[in-house]
Amino acid sequence: MYSAGLNNYCHFAEESGFLNATAMTCLDVPVEPRPSVVWENMQWQRSNILRVQALAAAKYACEVDSVHKSFIARKNDKPYMEGHHLIPLLNQGRFEYSLDVYANIVCLCPVCHRMLHYGRKQDVEPILERFWIERCKRFEHSGLSLTEGQFMNLALKNRI
Ligand SMILES: [Zn+2]
Ligand SMILES: [Zn+2]
């Protein structure tokens, strides 16, 4: 029952286009972090909705460069893109408010996504710096207070 409702919501979020990139910034508010122990399955589904909406808001274009091509996903007939948390969720303990928020999710083509995780520091750093400039105000609005240096440190730690 509950998951059917979530599915409908996902479809609604995905197809109605009610969230565009401008409207997204209105959603940049501090969010209480969810408990890490209970409702594990629901947590995943919730973050899945955020991810889907973040991709829709970016109009399924890679936020590193919108000309990047991907294939069409069979699930929704949209270009296949991936959501990436700039500040890795494993750092939640350092923040009062949730890291699983729109401001912290970027829409990336699969190559850029892998690059952010596995690429060389000198290639990744300029991209992260740009995301910082584009998003630092949104982080602030989402209750995520950190300096550029702290952001770069945490974002670079995403790399395995
Ligand atoms: Zn990622
Ligand atoms: Zn890309």
Image (spheres, rainbow, N blue to C red):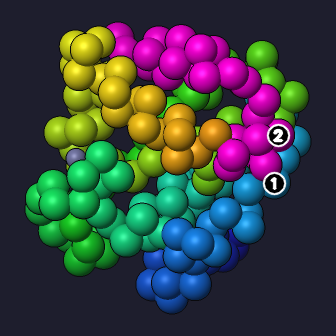
For disc 2, the marked residue is 143
Image location of residue 138, percent across then percent down: 68, 49
* Quadrant in which residue 139 is drawn: top right
Mark 2 CB within 8 Å of ligand 1: no
Q: Which mark is residue 29?
A: 1
In the picture, which quadrant includes the N terminus?
bottom right
Residue sitting nearer the eye, 120 or 96: 120
Image location of residue 60, percent across then percent down: 33, 66
Image location of residue 103, percent across then percent down: 62, 48
- Which residue occupies 42% across, 30% down? 128
Image location of residue 140, percent across then percent down: 76, 41
The amino acid pointed to by label 2 is: Gly
* In the image, residue 25 above or below residue 38: below
Mark 1 CB within 8 Å of ligand 1: no
Q: Does 104 sit left or right of 39 as displayed?
A: left
Q: Secondary structure at mark 1?
A: loop
The tag earlier along the polypeptide, 1 or 2, is 1
Taking the image as drawn, is residue 101 in sight? no
Q: Are marks 1 and 2 in contact (CB under 8 Å)?
A: yes
In the picture, which quadrant includes the C terminus?
top left
The magenta-colored residue range is: 137-160
Q: Secondary structure at mark 2?
A: loop
Q: Does 158 sit left or right of 2 as displayed?
A: left
Q: Does 14 lie within the magenta span?
A: no
Q: Does 139 sit left or right of 38 as displayed?
A: left
